[in-house]
Image (spheres, rainbow, N blue to C red):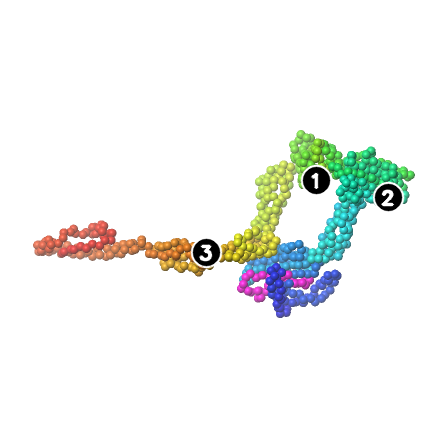
């Protein structure tokens, strides 16, 4: 290890200057050139980054800040690491160690593409995890709200060569790719009868995010007419619409093709698909090289030849005239050249064939079979190449056609709409009956359903049209399954005969098979990170399953599904998806907020708040989204408010013999203060006063004071009088007792004197103990004086 060295650079997220510290180690690394790749041993400095850095090495290590160098008493601690490698390379990060608390966040973002891309955060980060970017720029942001004891992480990164996505093959063509890495090429080509519309070659461009130099081309039908030299095998397809054709005159098409094979060869022309307006469209095929050659086929007079056409020489001349009408022009002709010793290659749409000789010499036999859902018509299942003087097949190739209705007894099969894959016609009324084993059930897999809304497809659970209707369908619908209750099913298709707005529709494709009987819907697996509640003990018809997710997960899909009459579930079971972001904390009134990163509120997002002029924040200036192992992510604090900025009201002081609810040195505008008095005192003034905003802010009322309660003093006086009465009363009784005894012994001797003395005083009644306690004046607290002469 070498001494740590400071590094000054700018934070790519905030633009602020940052100081980095790193340690330099030497180790052997893999050196990569932008144009060539060499693997050899070389000494390259490997920086163990401590906090904040801009890195451009092809391999390095990013670690959490050193506790000794980051033991600042100021929180939060934020570090940003910017990694930029050569264009055309990505950044592969391996998590060596990660141990963070809930007060810390670690976010890895990709930059340089169409926008910021969240690659990973601490919520889903695990030791050994490998994270790959799609561009050559990655930012790692670490933030800690803790004062000390920060968590730790160690990330090892290295550059890897990016590639372009594999190009898509155009419809009606293909693509060959030399390499998907920068410098590689993709070569596009089209099938016979098509031509490339766009660039035939695209190159993988070496940029921040490699991409192909041009978009994939399209394969379009060859323009109207042309001269095909040295023809072997190919197709002539419907020309472009009149509006884009160079050979069009107004809304009309006039196309001419000359097909020329090698000298000594002949041509066979097979009609794969053809749909012409009988009034406005016309196709003429001539055996020769001009419009004066004798015709072999005229669509106005001849039916479409099932066996195709044979030229008398090495050339065929085709004339097509068409007017834009309500019926789209449909044309697909297959031509093939052959010599005088071979037959032409047979062709069979919607089927296959096997041959005894792939060169189709004389004596070759070919056997045909139709694809499932099609029935062989208008030909033989086996043909032979005959006639040495004029080689040809002894019979025409058969035609495989999707019929309108039929009886099906095979354990499995396919049902197609009439004339599939071409569109069905008006006025169809087709009925298919499927007869299975009595101990089995019939499962219908409706893979394609695309009919008009005026046409009807009905499925009956039985052998005829009076059986119970399983389902009736109109228009288009995604793939679905139907299960019968018995061993027989009837399918009816009806197309409207008098629909003036008839348009071509694809039709339908249904696979059927016998299955074991079952009166319950298929058993569904348990949902991960959630649970299922069922209305029945088994999934019988009508039973309902209710899905719920654990805290921290949201349900994706329908939370309620039902077992339907056909023993299929009403929808696919949902899944529980980990909630990866906090809810929107909302805007702050009379203020603004900034969100980083800007895309959503994923874990690790920091929202900073500010107030307009004249307002100040009440609450935290920023909050961050933290992930939780057992719950949804949550914000670190409540969102603040922007309140009017006024001078605070000073504390008016605590009244004597009283107190306040909450003592503070100052109170903001709008705050209130409540006063209380101790027992024996009453509050004089306002109990609650408010701080009225202003410059300066003032209390709306003077502070109250505490006064001795009036009900407190009389009670004290009564207590004192009771104490005095308890002391004086016994003394008076003793004096009266002594006086009575004295008078008893001296009454005879002093009697005249005694009465004489009494004659000069006021008369009164002697006070007894009982009268003393019943004296109302004494109990009321009044004081009286009595004169007693003895």
Q: Residue furthest bottom?
A: 3
Along the polypeptide, which appears first: circle 1 or circle 3?
Answer: 1
Badge 3: how crowded within 10 Å, few (<14), some, or many (20+)? many
In this orientation, does residue 433 appear?
no
Q: Quadrant of the C terminus?
A: bottom left
Spatial CA distance of label 1 from label 3 is 73 Å
Residue ID for mark 3: 693
Which callout, 1 or 3, points to the residue nearer the camera?
3
Give the label on residue 357, or none.
none
Tell me the element at label 2: strand
Span colored in magenta? 55-82
Is residue 77 within the magenta segment? yes
Q: Position of residue 452 (x, y in %)?
A: 69, 36
Residue ID for mark 1: 448
In this orientation, does residue 79 appear?
yes
Q: Position of residue 781 (x, y in %)?
A: 24, 53
**Residue at x 83%, y 39% (from the top left corner):** 319
Residue ID for mark 2: 260
**Residue at x 90%, y 38% (from the top left corner):** 390
Foreground residue, 290 or 357? Answer: 290
With 607 as the anchor, is 694 left or right in this view? left
Q: Quadrant of the N terminus?
A: bottom right
With 515 as the anchor, is 673 left or right in this view? left
455 relative to 129, above or below: above
Q: Image quarter for residue 785?
A: bottom left
Badge 1: how crowded within 10 Å, few (<14), some, or many (20+)? some
Along the polypeptide, which appears first: circle 3 or circle 2?
Answer: 2
Foreground residue, 405 or 296? Answer: 296
Spatial CA distance of label 3 from label 2 is 99 Å
Spatial CA distance of label 2 from label 1 is 41 Å
């Amino acid at each position: 290890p070498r001494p740590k060295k400071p590094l000054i650079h700018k934070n790519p997220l905030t633009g602020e200057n940052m100081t980095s510290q790193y340690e330099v180690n030497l180790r052997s690394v893999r050196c990569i050139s932008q144009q060539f790749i060499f693997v050899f041993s070389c000494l390259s400095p490997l920086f163990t980054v401590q906090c904040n850095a801009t890195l451009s090495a092809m391999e390095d290590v990013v670690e959490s800040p050193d506790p000794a160098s980051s033991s600042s008493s100021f929180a939060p601690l934020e570090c940003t690491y910017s990694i930029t490698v050569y264009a055309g390379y990505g950044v592969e990060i391996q998590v060596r160690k990660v141990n963070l608390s809930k007060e810390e966040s670690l976010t890895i973002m990709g930059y340089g593409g169409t926008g910021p891309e969240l690659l990973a955060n601490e919520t889903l980060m695990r030791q050994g995890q490998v994270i790959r970017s799609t561009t050559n720029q990655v930012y790692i942001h670490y933030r800690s709200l803790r004062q000390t004891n920060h968590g730790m992480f160690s990330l090892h990164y290295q550059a890897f060569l990016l590639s372009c996505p594999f190009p898509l093959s155009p419809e009606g063509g293909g693509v060959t790719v030399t390499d998907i890495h920068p410098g590689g090429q993709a070569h596009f080509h089209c099938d016979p009868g098509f031509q490339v519309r766009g660039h035939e070659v695209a190159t993988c461009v070496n940029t921040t995010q490699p991409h192909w130099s041009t978009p994939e081309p399209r394969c379009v039908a060859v323009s109207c007419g042309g001269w095909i030299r040295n023809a072997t095998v190919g197709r002539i397809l419907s020309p472009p619409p009149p509006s884009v054709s160079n050979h069009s005159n107004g809304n009309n098409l006039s196309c001419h093709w000359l097909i020329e094979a090698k000298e000594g060869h002949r041509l066979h022309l097979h009609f794969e698909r053809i749909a012409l307006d009988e009034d406005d469209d016309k196709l003429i095929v001539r055996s020769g090289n001009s419009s004066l050659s004798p015709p072999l086929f005229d669509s106005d007079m001849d039916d479409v030849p099932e066996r195709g056409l044979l030229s008398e020489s090495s050339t065929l001349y085709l004339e097509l005239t068409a007017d834009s009408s309500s019926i789209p022009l449909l044309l697909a002709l297959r031509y093939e050249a052959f010599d005088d010793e071979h037959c032409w290659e047979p062709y069979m749409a919607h089927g296959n064939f096997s041959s005894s000789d792939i060169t189709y010499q004389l004596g070759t036999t070919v056997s045909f079979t139709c694809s499932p859902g099609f029935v062989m018509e208008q030909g033989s299942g086996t043909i032979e190449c005959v006639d040495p003087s004029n080689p040809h097949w002894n019979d025409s190739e058969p035609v495989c056609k999707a019929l309108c209705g039929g009886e099906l007894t095979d354990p499995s099969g396919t049902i197609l709409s009439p004339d599939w894959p071409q569109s069905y016609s008006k006025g169809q009324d087709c009925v298919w009956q499927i007869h299975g084993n009595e101990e089995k059930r019939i499962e219908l897999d409706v893979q394609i359903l695309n009919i008009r809304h005026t046409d009807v497809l009905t499925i009956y659970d039985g052998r005829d049209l009076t059986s119970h209707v399983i389902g009736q369908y109109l228009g288009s619908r995604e793939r679905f399954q139907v299960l019968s209750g018995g061993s027989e099913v009837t399918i009816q298709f009806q197309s409207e005969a008098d629909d003036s707005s008839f348009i071509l529709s694809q039709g339908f494709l249904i696979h059927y098979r016998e299955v074991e009987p079952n009166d319950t819907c298929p058993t569904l697996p348990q949902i991960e990170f959630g649970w299922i509640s069922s209305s029945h003990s088994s999934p019988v018809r009508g039973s309902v399953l209710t899905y719920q997710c654990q805290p921290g997960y949201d349900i994706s899909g329908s939370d309620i599904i039902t077992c339907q009459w056909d023993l299929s579930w009403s929808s696919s079971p949902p899944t529980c998806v980990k909630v990866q972001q906090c809810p929107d904390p909302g805007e702050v009134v009379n203020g603004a907020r900034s969100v980083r990163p800007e895309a959503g509120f994923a874990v690790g997002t920091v929202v900073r708040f500010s107030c307009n002029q004249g307002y100040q924040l009440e609450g935290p200036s920023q909050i961050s989204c933290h992930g939780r192992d057992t719950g949804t992510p949550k914000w670190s604090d409540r969102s603040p408010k922007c309140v009017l900025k006024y001078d605070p009201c000073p504390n008016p002081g605590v009244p004597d013999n009283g107190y306040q609810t909450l003592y503070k040195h100052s109170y903001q505008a709008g705050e209130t203060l409540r006063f209380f008095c101790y027992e024996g005192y009453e509050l004089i003034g306002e109990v609650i006063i408010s701080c009225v905003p202003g410059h300066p802010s003032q209390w709306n009322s003077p502070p109250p004071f505490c006064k001795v309660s009036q009900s407190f003093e009389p009670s004290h006086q009564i207590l004192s009088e009771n104490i005095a009465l308890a002391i004086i009363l016994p003394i008076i009784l003793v004096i009266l007792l002594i006086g009575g005894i004295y008078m008893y012994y001296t009454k005879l001797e002093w009697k005249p004197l005694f009465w004489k003395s009494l004659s000069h005083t006021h008369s009164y009644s002697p006070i007894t103990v009982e009268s003393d306690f019943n004296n109302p004046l004494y109990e009321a607290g009044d004081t009286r004086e009595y004169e007693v002469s003895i």
